[in-house]
Structures are given as C-alpha cells and as structure tokens.
Image (tube, rainbow, N blue to C red):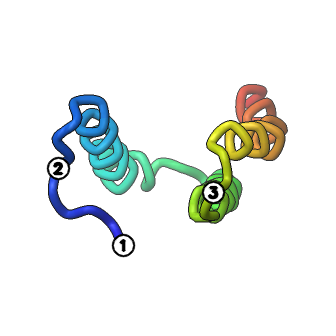
Amino acid sequence: MARTAKPSDPTDREIYDTHRRYIAVMEGARLAEISAETKAHYLRILQSLTEKLAMPGKPLSEVVGEMMAEAAPLLFQAMQR
C-alpha cells in the first residue's frame, strides 16, 4: 500500500515529492498530448516497471538493467520521430 505521510529522511522525501510531481504532470497536460501509439508503449513500460519493483527482494540494479533492455528500442524509436 502507498505511504500516506511524507518520510522524514531528506532523500526519501525528495523521491516522494518527485513521484507526486511526476503524477501531477502526466495526469495534467502531458497525457492529453501523447498519441495513442505512444500511450500504448508507455503503458507497457510502466506496467512492466511496476511489476518488477513489486517483486520482493529483487535488486534495484536488476530492475534497472531489465528496464533498460525493454525500454531502449522504444526510446530510440521515439527519438527518431
């Protein structure tokens, strides 16, 4: 379950605040501007990342490596547009 109170550690608090800002930006103007195809790719990456992060004991370095391999082709494709 998501945390409801801000953490006391300064770095944790920055992560907390950045996550909330990211959500506000995406749900605000950004999401409406994205094409249906890009939304499908983004959703797939976001779902995959969330599933990997939810695996207990999975090292963050492993999550990042897997996400780089999955997202790289989509990122390069987006840069060519």
* Residue labelled with disc 3: 57
Residues at marks 3 and 1, CA–CA distance in whole angstroms: 17 Å
Q: Residues within 10 Å of mark 1 (few under 14, many from 20)?
A: few
Q: Residue furthest bottom?
A: 1
Total tally of numbered discs in the picture: 3
Is residue 30 found left or right of 60 in the rendered image?
left
The amino acid at mark 2 is Lys
Q: Earlier in the sequence, mark 3 or mark 1?
A: 1
Callout in the foreground (3, 1): 3
* Residue labelled with disc 1: 1
Q: Residue at x 25, y 41 (%)?
A: 17
Residues at marks 2 and 1, CA–CA distance in whole angstroms: 14 Å
Nearest the viewer among 24 and 5 is 5
- The spot of residue 54 in percent (x, y) is 57, 64
Residue 28 visible from this viewpoint: yes
What kind of element bears circle 3? loop
- The spot of residue 70 in percent (x, y) is 80, 46
Is residue 31 depicted above or below 54 in this figure? above
Is residue 42 depicted above or below 9 in this figure? below
Residue 6's tag is 2
Nearest the viewer among 45 and 37 is 45
Q: Residue at x 41, y 46 (%)?
A: 30
The amino acid at mark 3 is Gly
- Verify CB contact (< 8 Å) between mark 2 and mark 1: no
Q: Residue furthest front?
A: 57
